[in-house]
Amino acid sequence: METVLKYIWIAVFITVLVWSGIHPKEQMTWFLEVLPALLGVGLLIVTYNRFRLTPLLYLFILIHCIILMVGGHYTYAEVPLFDWLRDGLGGERNNYDKVGHFAQGFVPALLAREILLRKAVVNGATWLNFFIISICLAVSAFYELLEWWVALAIGQDADAFLGTQGYIWDTQSDMGCALLGAISCLLLLSKWHDQQLSKY
């Protein structure tokens, strides 16, 4: 069963990756958005035999990769479903990027939790949750710094990658979404995750 799930995971990843790379809105934006997914999968391949993750974590890593690849294909500011939601709800901006930043807290929280528990790094649930949330905020802050550095390096072409859409509090709200994602992960998945971790 595990082998079947592995091949399904690979097939879904490759299918969405190929789709996202066919006539993306902006080639440079596609590359920048998809690069973290490609690097992440490379890391999963290298560590697969030495430190195999729980099926739950692999599932959410795949979901996060799909979010990145969809954002890369359309640009985060122009994902059609979120244009429709914006227009239907009378909003001012396409909020697909907030989904991405929520996942940027949610999935790293699960990953950090798995590593910290399996390596017995932290004692006690309170300290564990504190460190997980701190790690997620650090990841989110570092990503915002990367966006800034990319913008400085490539200039005008970075607008679609930044996806601020004129919102002056975009960086802060991105980090707020990551924080919300991390807390949501801990509240919703900890028990399920513990059940899977008991087998490792």
Image (cartoon, rainbow, N blue to C red):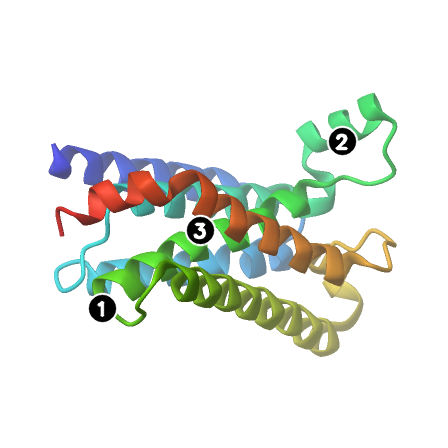
The residue under the point 45% across, 68% down is 131
Q: Earlier in the sequence, mark 2 or mark 3?
A: 2
Which residue type does callout 3 highlight? Val
Tell us which disc is closer to us: 2 or 3: 3
Label 3 – label 1 distance at C-alpha:
18 Å
Residue 83 numbered mark, or none: 2
Tell us which disc is closer to us: 1 or 2: 1
The residue under the point 44% across, 60% down is 129
Q: Quadrant of residue 115?
A: bottom left
The residue under the point 38% across, 61% down is 112
Tell us which disc is closer to us: 3 or 1: 1
Which residue type does callout 1 highlight? Lys
Element under disc 2: helix
Instruction: Say if mark 1 contacts mark 2, CB within 8 Å.
Output: no
Q: Quadrant of residue 60?
A: top left
Q: Position of residue 125 (x, y in %)?
A: 37, 58
Nearest the camera: 90 or 84? 90
Task: Give the vertical position of 112 relative to 87 (above or below).
Answer: below
Mark 3 highlights which residue? Answer: 107
